[in-house]
Image (cartoon, rainbow, N blue to C red):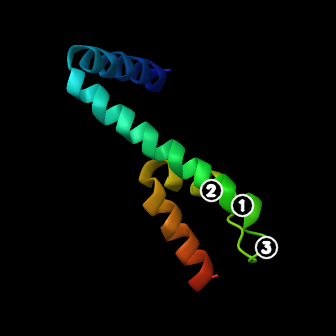
Amino acid sequence: MIMLVMLVISVVGLLVVLLRQRSAWKVVMAFLLHGVAAFVLLYLLNSTGWIAGLHVPTNPITLLTVGLLGVPGLAAIVFLKMVVI
């Protein structure tokens, strides 16, 4: 219960900061744009990658990595898949 209250307070605080500063919205929108581009590339890779024998499994770890790091995160996962696994 305490963690839920802390989560709500921190989300409200983040929204207050974002609403007061216009430059923060630019950073958030850029972050979201990079994440969406990486998710689209992940989808395209998985839908056409079977031809080349490359398939990146869609699980919470890969989605979190691609979402946070964007296209470089997807490239890192593909590199690890090709070299390590």
Q: Which mark is residue 5?
A: none
Circle 1 or circle 3, nearest the eye: 3
Say whether residue 80 is visible.
Answer: yes
Which picture quadrant has residue 50? bottom right
User: Which residue is the site of mark 2?
Assistant: 42
Circle 3 or circle 2, nearest the eye: 3
The residue under the point 57% across, 85% down is 83
Q: Which mark is residue 46?
A: 1
Q: CA distance from mark 3 to mark 2?
A: 15 Å
User: Which residue is the site of mark 3?
Assistant: 51
Q: CA distance from mark 1 to mark 3?
A: 10 Å
The residue under the point 42% across, 24% down is 7
Kind of residue at disc 1: Asn
Residue placed farthest to the bottom in the image? 83
Give the crowd class for mark 2: few <14, some 14-19, many >=20 residues within 10 Å.
many
Give the crowd class for mark 1: few <14, some 14-19, many >=20 residues within 10 Å.
some
